[in-house]
Image (cartoon, helix red, strand yellow):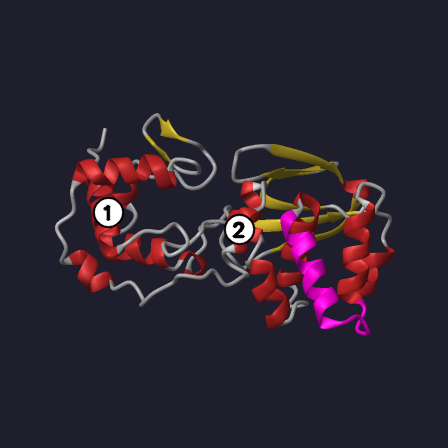
């Protein structure tokens, strides 16, 4: 809870971040002070991780979330930026994307290949292109039809692939690590969306919590239009089986 977050040893946090946490948890602090604290935390790597943890536990008000959303999508940590799309409102979303309309749009393989390289390859692989963080997509057409693929891109939280559920690990020094669970024994190994791995001794773990929200940002957050999705699906389904 709020008190637990404040009471845990936090030697690695700056004075400014500690004060922001105190302000955010203090019910007597003014709304102006709390929104200022939200901004401070949202801009900071450690602060951003703390906000993700609080958001995952429904410990933030809508006012907090709206203020945090102004800054957290510019956080220097890519993992935080991507995870934030599942917890905080992002301005600019328009009408819902229509799968029927996408299916009836002629997709271009060449455009889809460029979109994959620019939007998807940071986490997924097709052949030798991309990173091995999310599910491998070379033979995705053998697992999904186009409708299923598009639904997974537009609504990634609806069906998280087993083994790709994100976790939040909180340690005694009040640090929160967000990512995929690679292994667990005497240490816990977490992989973030850039592929970097963090090794955490079990003796330092205060809490380990699986999230029900995908690490993958949805199509809206990726800035994909219906035409983009038609191109991307056409490209992925054009890849020949080896």
The rendered magenta stretch, by its main secondary structure, is classed as helix
From the viewer's perspective, tell me whether residue 127 is left or right of residue 199.
Answer: left
Q: Secondary structure at mark 1?
A: helix
Q: Nearer the viewer, residue 25 or 141?
A: 25
- The image position of residue 133, as x and y in percent, is 48, 37
Quarter of the image where one finds residue 108:
top left
Label 2 and label 1: CA atoms lie apart by: 27 Å
> Counting residues from the N terminus, which is met first, the one under dot 2 or under dot 1?
2
- The image position of residue 15, as x and y in percent, is 83, 47
Please tell me whether residue 31 belongs to the stretch shown in magenta: yes
Q: Residues within 10 Å of mark 2 (few under 14, many from 20)?
A: many
User: Do the CB atoms of the residues marked 2 and 1 lie less than 8 Å apart?
Assistant: no
Please report the residue visible at 54 percent of the width from the left and 54 percent of the height from the top. 84
- Tell which residue pokes out farthest to the bottom in this image: 28
Q: What are the residue bounds of the magenta stretch?
A: 26-43
Please report the residue visible at 79 percent of the width from the left and 49 percent of the height from the top. 16
Q: Secondary structure at mark 2?
A: helix
Which of the numbered marks, if any, corresponds to residue 12? none
134 vs 27: above or below? above
Which of the numbered marks, if any, corresponds to residue 73? 2
* Residue at image mark 1: 233
- The image position of residue 154, as x and y in percent, is 35, 57
Q: Nearer the viewer, residue 230 or 162?
A: 230
Q: Nearer the viewer, residue 160 or 23?
A: 23
Quarter of the image where one finds residue 61:
bottom right
Of the 4 image quadrants, the one containing the C terminus is top left
Q: Nearer the viewer, mark 2 or mark 1?
A: 2
Please tell me whether residue 162 belongs to the stretch shown in magenta: no
Of the 4 image quadrants, the one containing the N terminus is bottom right
From the viewer's perspective, tell me whether residue 68 is left or right of residue 144.
Answer: right
Q: Is residue 42 visible?
A: yes
């Amino acid at each position: 809870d709020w008190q637990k977050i404040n009471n845990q040893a936090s030697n690695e946090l700056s004075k400014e971040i500690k004060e922001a946490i105190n302000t955010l948890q203090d019910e007597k602090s003014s709304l102006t002070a709390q929104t200022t604290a939200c901004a401070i935390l949202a801009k900071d790597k450690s602060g951003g991780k703390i906000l993700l943890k609080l958001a995952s536990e429904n410990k933030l008000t809508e006012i907090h979330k709206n203020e945090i959303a102004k800054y957290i999508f510019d956080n220097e940590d890519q993992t935080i930026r991507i995870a934030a799309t599942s917890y905080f409102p992002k301005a600019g979303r328009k009408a819902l994307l229509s799968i029927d309309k996408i299916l009836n749009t002629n997709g271009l393989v060449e455009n889809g290949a460029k979109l994959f390289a620019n939007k998807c390859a940071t986490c997924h692989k097709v052949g030798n292109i991309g990173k091995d963080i999310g599910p491998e997509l070379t033979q995705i057409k053998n697992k999904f039809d186009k409708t299923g693929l598009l639904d997974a891109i537009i609504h990634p939280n609806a069906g998280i692939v087993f083994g790709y559920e994100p976790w939040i690990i909180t340690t005694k020094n009040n640090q929160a690590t967000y990512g995929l669970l690679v292994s667990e024994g005497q240490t816990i190994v977490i992989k973030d969306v850039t592929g970097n791995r963090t090794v955490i001794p079990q003796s330092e773990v205060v809490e380990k919590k699986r999230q029900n929200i995908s690490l993958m940002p949805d199509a809206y957050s990726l800035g994909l239009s219906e035409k983009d999705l038609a191109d991307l699906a056409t490209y992925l389904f054009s890849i020949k089986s080896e």
